[in-house]
Image (cartoon, grey):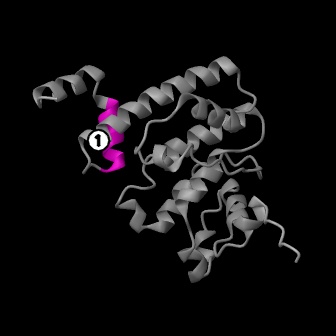
Amino acid sequence: MATKPKASADEKFTNMDFPLFPALDALDKKDYRYYDNLTTEQQKGFVPYMLVHWMSAVQTNAAVQQYYLQSTDYSANKYLFHETITKHPKLQWLMLCAVSPNVGKQYHKFIPNISRKVSLLQEPAKLKDTKEYFKKIYPKTDDDLIEAVSQEFVMQQKKKCHLAKLFPNLKQEDIEVLNDILTEEDIKKYEKDRGN
């Protein structure tokens, strides 16, 4: 019995209700009207989370790669999933359009998260996995810089995991804020005051 060949990653993403690759082209062109021209079914299939991953990773020169990554974080990633904004998919589309420097069509590649448990702050990141992940995203980057960025990520993510355990009812965005304002000493003092 013949087995069915496995579908490539691009084929899997092509067979979706939402037209992913045409949408990425529209985002590269800053086509603010594209979302309005989608059918109702296509609008229902709009998944901003997936587009953030695709938008942030382009295969081109280092300057454009850096721009897309930083612009994705600044223009979309920070607020795209805020509970008020998630109720307005058109606004999310506009935020994603703001990412592009409008320098023409780019080749976007999907970079999966390090792991689901790491991204949900259920377990701390491992340095080896983190270095491999960043090497996939930035293949032309110096190994020493990959090492430094990976170490910083692991340290910050470990702190976020600890905060998630201390405050299990907080949303992930609130944990991000706490991570930015609390020092290790603040956390130790809090735990000491609680008797831990």
Q: Which residue is mark 1?
A: 165
Residue at the far front: name it: 1
For the residue pair 93 and 121, the one nearer the viewer reads as: 121
- Residue 54 lies, with reference to residue 195, above or below; the image says below
Tell me the SS state at disc 1.
Answer: helix
Q: Residue at x 67, y 51 (%)?
A: 110
Residue 8 in the image, given as x and y percentages of width and height: 79, 61
Q: Is residue 92 above or below residue 159?
A: below
Residue 139 x %, y %: 74, 32
Between 27 and 20, the residue placed more toward the observer is 20
Q: Position of residue 126 (x, y in %)?
A: 52, 32
**Which corner quadrant holds the C terminus?**
top left
Q: Main secondary structure of the magenta part?
A: helix
Residue sitting at x 72%, y 50%: 109
Question: The magenta stretch spans which residues?
Answer: 171-180
Q: Residue at x 59, y 35 (%)?
A: 129
Please tell me which residue lies in front, 169 or 19. 169
Q: Position of residue 43 (x, y in %)?
A: 56, 75
